[in-house]
Amino acid sequence: MGIVRLAKTLFTALAAAGILAAQSQPPLAQRIAARLRPNGLKADISFLASDALQGRATPSPGLDMAAEYIAAQFRRAGLEPVGDDGYFQNAGYQTVKPNPEGLAFTLDTAKAGEGTVAIQEAVATDLNRAAAFKVTLSDTAALDALTAEEVRGKVLLVEVPDGGGAGMAAFQAQRRILTLAAKLEPAIVVMVRAAAQQTNPNARVPLRDATAPAPKVPILNVWDKAIRDAVAAAKPGPIEAAVSAHLAAPIVQPVKLRNVAGVLRGTDPQLKDTYVVVTGHYDHLGVRPNAQGDSIYNGANDDASGAASVIAIANALAELEEKPKRTIVFVTVFGEELGGLGARWYTGHPIFPIARTVADINLEQLGRTDDNEGPKVAQFNLTGFDYTDIAATFAKAGAVTGVQVIKHEKNSDSFFGRSDNATFADAGIPSTTLSVSYIFPDYHQPGDEWQKLDYDNLAKVDVTVALGILDMANSAQAPQWNKENPKTARYVQAREKQ
C-alpha cells in the first residue's frame, strides 16, 4: 500500500514538473525565431545567388550545384530523404534541338528561299503535294469553328496578319491554334508571316518530358514573299494548292534535372499520412550571352530567397521538440522559369499521393522589400487570397509575430497562375504563393543580387510562414477551396475527382 502511495506521489510530482517545464518554455514563435536567423538566410542566399552558380539555368552545372547544396542543408536539418536517389527526385527530360538539314517547303511551284523558313516544332515529316487548308490567325471565330474532318491529314496554312506577331491578343490567338493542332491532327501547321519572327537571343534548347507522348504535328514559320502572296490571295478554307515539305527528325538528348525533397514525418495516427507540401524554385535565367557588363542573372530574390526559406523553415521545424501531426514535405523544384517543369514533374510523379496532399505553400520573392509600389516591410502577400481558407491560417500566425498578411487587390488573382502553386492547383490541391513583393527593381534582370535583400525582414516573414505551416499541419481541418468563388471551379472539380 505504501509502495502504491509512493508511486502516485512520484507520478504527481513528475506531471507537475512537466507542466511547469512546458509553462516555462518560450512561446512557439520565439522558439522558431531562435532557430531561423537572418544570417543563416544570408549565407544560403549568397551562395545560391553567387556568380559561381552562373544564374542556375535549367539545365546547367550551376543548377546541379544548387541542388547538391540544398540536399546538404536538408541532410543537416535531419529531414528524411524521399526522392528516388536520396534527396533527389530525378526527372526524365530531354533537350529537343531542331535539325535544319534538308529543310524545305514548297507551295505549288513557289519554293521557300533560303533563310525564309524556320522550325518551330520539330517532328520528322515528308509531304509530297499534300492538300492545304487556310485560316487567318486574327479570325478567332473561324479558328474555333475548325473541325478535324476539315483539317486532319492536310496542311494547315495560318496567315499571320502584319503586326500579328506582337501583342497579347496575337499571343493568345497563336496559342489557340497550336492547341487546336493537337486536336485537329493536320499533317503540318505552317505559320505564314510577313517577316521573320523575332527570336529571343537568350532562348535555350527546348525541353521535353521524356515520359509524355512526343508532339505529332510539326510547325513551321515561313516568310517567303511568293508564298506569302499566294496564301494572301486564297480564300479561307480548302485551297487549290499542293504542299511539299521535308523536316528532319530533331536532335534529342537526355538531361539531368532534379527536384530536391525531404520530409518531416507527422506523428498523429490519423493525420500522419496526409501531407502539407512546401515548395520554392531554385532555378533562374542563367547567363545573358553577348551582354555588355553584368551578364549573370543571379536570381537572389527570384527565387533563391524562396529556396533558402524552404531550407530555413525545414530546419527550424525539425529542431522543435514537438513534431507535427501531419507530414510536411519540403521540395525545391527546377524549371519554374521554363513553365513550371519541376512542379509539373512532381504532380505527374508524386512522391506522396495527391489525394492525401492537403496544401501546397509556395515561396517566391520573399527577400526584397523595395517593391515598385513602395516599401513592403513586415507583411507578405498571398496569391489567390480568396481562393482558399489558407489566408486565415497565416493571418493568425501574423497576429502573433506582428507581420501583416495582405491581399493585393490587383495582383492577388492575376499572379495566381504565374508560379508553381498553379500546377498544384491544377491537380486539385489547395495552394497559394507567398511573396513580399510582386514586382521589384531588377526583376528578371542581372541586378537581382543577394546584397539587396532585407534579411531581418525575411527572417520575420519566414517565422510567420513557419508558424502558419505548423498550424496547418496540426489542424484536424485540412485547407479547403472556396467553392463560392467562381474562379476556383476548375480546381474544386479536380479535387472532387480524386
Image: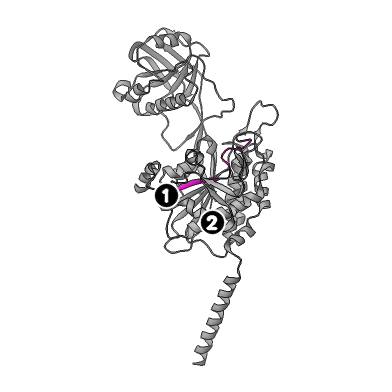
Q: Amino acid at mark 2?
A: Ala
Among the 4 quarters of the image, the one containing residue 137: top left
For label 2, the residue is: 397
State the extent of the magenta-drawn residues as a range.
429-444
Residue at 43 percent across and 64 percent down: it is 269
- Label the magenta part by its dominant secondary structure: loop
Q: Report the label total.
A: 2
Q: Position of residue 104 (x, y in %)?
A: 46, 15
Classify mark 1: helix, strand or loop.
Answer: helix
Task: Depth check: give the residue in front, 213 or 228.
Answer: 228
Q: Earlier in the sequence, mark 2 or mark 1?
A: 1
Residue position marked by numbered label 1 in the rendering: 354
Is 79 placed above or below 48 here? Answer: below
Helix, strand or loop for disc 2: helix
- Colour approach in the figure: one colour
Q: Is 441 part of what is drawn in magenta? A: yes
Q: Residue at x 46, y 54 (%)?
A: 275
Residue type at the position of mark 1: Ile
Question: Is residue 258 in view from this perspective?
Answer: yes
Residue 155 in the magenta stretch? The answer is no
Residue 136 drawn at (x, y percent):
39, 18
